[in-house]
Structure formats: C-alpha cells, structure tokens
Image (cartoon, rainbow, N blue to C red):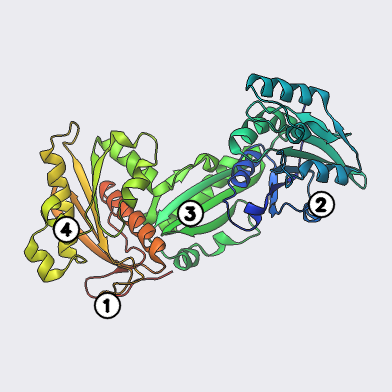
Amino acid sequence: MGQVFQHATVVSIGDELAIGQSLDTNSKWLSNQLTAMGVRVIEHVAVPDDVQAMLAALRRLANNADLIVATGGLGPTADDLSRAVLAALLGDALVRDEVAYRELEALFRKRGRELTEANAMQALRPASATCLSNPHGTAPGLRAQYRVADRAVEVFMLPGPPHENRPMFEAFVAPAIKRPVGHVIRARVIHHYGPAESEAARRLGPLLDRDRNPLVGITASDGVISLRIRYEGAEEDAERLIEATDAEVERVLASHRFAVVDDPGAEVAPPIYVALLEELKQRGATLVTAESCTGGMLAECITSISGSSSNFVGGFVTYSNELKHRVLGVERAVLEAHGAVSGETAREMAAGAVRTALHAQIPGTHETHALSITGIAGPDGGSREKPVGTVWIGRASSSDVDVEARRFVFPGDRATVRRRSAATATAMLLFHLTGREMPRMLWQVEPDGTPPMGG
C-alpha cells in the first residue's frame, strides 16, 4: 500500500558526476518515472563523494520534499559513503543485515569467489533502515524514513548503474507511491525545426507565461525547438486543456512542426531522426547518405535507432575529392570549378548516392532518397567566401528529377557544426517527404545572400 508524495528530489552521488566527467542519465530516467506517477520532481542534485556535502544536501532537500531518491555510493570501495551518510542523517549505528549478508555469500560462492571484508560491507545498513535486494549486482539498496519536525521524508538509496537501479526502482520505489486520486500530471512535447528560439518565443507570446496551467516550456537543441506542455490538476480537465494549448501552438508554428509525443519520458533518440525513419517506413522508401565533413555522423544518428535497417540501406563517407569522383561520380570539372564545398558538388553527391543505390538493385529501393553533406567544420580551412561553418546540404530522390542543395553557415565548434549539419539534412528530407513547403531554416543562407537567422 503506497502513499501519496507531493514533491520529490533526485540525488546523484559521485565525484565523476559532480565534476561533469560522466553524464548523469539516472536523474532523467527517475524524474520521468516519478512524474508519470503524479509526483512533482522539484530538484536534481549531483554531489561529490564527500560526507559533509552529502549530508548537507540531504538535509536541505528534506526541507522541501517528502520523497528523496538517491543513486550511487553503495559499492565496496572507500569512496562509497552512502551507507555511512544515511546512518549519520538518521542518527543510527551501522548494523549488519543478515539477509543481505547471506545473499552476498551465496552470490560470491556461485561465482567461485571469496566474500572479502570490503564486499561484506555492502550488507551494512543504518539500524532503522531496510535493505533492498539487488538481483543484478552486489550492492543492496536502502530505504529509511527521516523525520523533519512533525513529518516523515521517505529516502531511497539505490546503486548507481542503471541496469541495477531501474529494476530496483520498479520493485521497491514504484510500489511505495500511491497515485493521487483524480489528480494527474500529463505532458505532451511538440517538436519543431527551423525557427530561432527567440523567434519562436516571440510568436508564442503569453503562451510561455509561467503562471498558466498547462505550463509551456521551450528548449532548443541543434535547430530543434521542443515545446513541452505540462498539465497538473484534475484528471477530467487534462485532455481538454492540453489540446487547447496545442491548438494555440500549432496556430503560430504549424509550418515548423514535425512530431508530437504524448509520452515524452519514453523518447530515447533525437526526435528528428525518429520522425524521418517513421515517414520513410510509411512510404516504403529507403535512404542513402553521402557525407564529407560530417564523416558518417548522419548515418550513425540514423542507425542508432532500432529498426533503422528496414529503411536505411547504407552511406558513403567521401572525404577526398578523388573519392567523391570515383565513388559518387562527381565530375572533376565540377570539383575544379566550384570546389568540394559548393551547391554543385552537394547536388552531384546526392544524385550519385541515389544512382549507386539503384544500380546495386537492393530489394525495396523502388523509392530511394539521398542526403549529401559537404562543408567546412573547422576550426581551420575557412576563407572569406567560405567561412568556417559553411555547409552545403543536398537532397535527391529516385522519384524526383529535381536535385536540391541549400547553403548554411552553422555557428559553433567543430562538433557543433557537424551535429547541426546532420540534423538539418534530416529536416530537409522530412519536410520534402511530408509535402510541405519548406520554411526558411535556421542558419540558412538564401540564394540572394540573405544571411542566416542566427539564434
């Protein structure tokens, strides 16, 4: 029988997380799970492996939350301090949990190893806490209640590795949470491509006011503008108010919209690539890529998505002019007259990729589309006419005689230019396939020389 929690905080423990050496994926996953259960997550904290820092963080967070979920610091090494810190927080002594100890003995015996003193420490717990069995590792979790004045704060401590803490969250934390009757938290994320974040915010106007419900939040990443509609309140009003807000968003940004997600916590890949693959799948079409400055990044982004092999037939990385000519059939005269970074070369690369895919007679390639990318990612190689960040993106299709190329000037370092190039190429093809007039895209240079929008 669970209880209703109003506010939760998520704590990630470890020096590597506090200093940014490792990416904290636990906070994102845990927050999505808690939000889906109707618990408002009010803060994420990353703390180092330091007793005083950990204690201070837990005490502060307990003042504002009635549920704390922490990950990390439960292993067998000297910097695994979570057990000792929880004991200090509760004012308890550490005691050996006999059930946890026997489980550790059995696990090490099964592995043909001796249970060392360091590993046996993982069976210690604060006297008033409960050990939580970990079927995927050696470190049990912990559950305790910490009293603040006249109320109790539920504290869960889970191991750091996601393959251990996620099953434990589902086994121990989720059953402890009771969904509030009639009260829900719902979210919808609407993805757009093209406008600068500042321009999108200007168009949305009062929709971004922070005192409204549903609340609309805006984030930008490599040209993708994501609007998160978050509703909290009576269940019977949720769908109506979210739909009404969505309609207002569509009214001002419809031409840029490419995906709507009603379960944003389930998103595991950048939405622009998922949307393109879904469109290709619906059409029974395939994709081939021809890349220079991105070095295969576009193909990697596509193939990182499960099931992509049904629609992605392959790609070419043609860094040198010679390979552009020999593999893709780019005319030497074009390369000599216009250079590798040009609309002419981008068009011939895309057309050559389609031609090569068709000649291979790959089953299912009756409709094949190609994207090409050629540019100057930097930090060297730029000129006055073609500054660093200049990228030409080409698009060709077996079902269309027109071959398109667009010029962009992407700001940022080498990695950013390459990332934005891959995302923008994907957006170009996606808008083409959905039969919509292409909006002017972020960082695009018009044929008349009109500079990029920026943002």
Q: Is residue 8 left or right of residue 202?
A: right
Q: Which residue is mark 1?
A: 383
Mark nearer the N terminus (2 vs 3): 2
**Whole-percent x and y of residue 126?**
86, 36
Which amino acid type corresponds to the residue marked 2 in the rendered image?
A: Leu
**Whole-percent x and y of residue 306?**
39, 35
Mark nearer the N terminus (2 vs 1): 2
Spatial separation of the CA atoms under disc 2 and disc 3: 36 Å
Q: Which residue is mark 3?
A: 226
Q: Is residue 26 left or right of residue 293?
A: right
Task: Determine contact: label 4, label 1, CB under 8 Å.
Answer: no
Packing grade of label 2 (10 A; few <14, some 14-19, many >=20) is: some
Q: Is residue 399 visible?
A: no
**Whole-percent x and y of residue 212?**
63, 56
Residue at left offset 21%, top offset 60%? 405
**Whole-percent x and y of residue 434?**
29, 47
Which amino acid type corresponds to the residue marked 4 in the rendered image?
A: Arg
Foreground: disc 4 or disc 1? 1
Mark nearer the N terminus (2 vs 4): 2
Q: Which residue is mark 4?
A: 347
Which amino acid type corresponds to the residue marked 3 in the rendered image?
A: Ser
Q: Secondary structure at mark 1?
A: loop
Task: Determine contact: label 2, label 3, CB under 8 Å.
Answer: no
Q: Secondary structure at mark 4?
A: helix
